[in-house]
Amino acid sequence: MSGKKAGLACSVCGSRNYTKSTSEGKSGQRLETKKYCKYCNKHTLHKETK
């Protein structure tokens, strides 16, 4: 039961602010969610990176 770690990067400034563990069986879809970016100082769209 080993999951990989993926980072969540801000789509505005590109900084990786959050990490998330993902399961192996996921079918290639990347997570997109609105989260707070401390560098932009506002809520922005964050996309999953490797």
Image (spheres, rainbow, N blue to C red):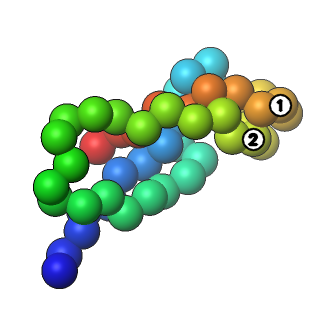
- The kind of secondary structure element at disc 1 is strand
* Callout 1 amino acid: Lys
Check whether the beta carbons of the residues at disc 2 and disc 1 lie within 8 A of each other.
Answer: yes
36 with respect to 30 (left or right): right
The residue to which callout 1 is attached is 42
45 with respect to 1 (left or right): right
- The kind of secondary structure element at disc 2 is strand
* Callout 2 amino acid: Tyr
Quarter that holds the N terminus: bottom left
The residue to which callout 2 is attached is 36
The x and y percentages for residue 43 are 77, 32
Which residue is rendered at x = 19% and y = 36% of the image? 28
Q: CA distance from mark 2 to mark 1?
A: 6 Å
Which residue is rendered at x = 62% and y = 27% of the image? 45
Q: Is residue 21 above or below residue 33?
A: below
N-term-proximal mark, 2 vs 1: 2
Which image quadrant is residue 46 in?
Answer: top right
The x and y percentages for residue 16 are 52, 42
Quarter that holds the C terminus: top left
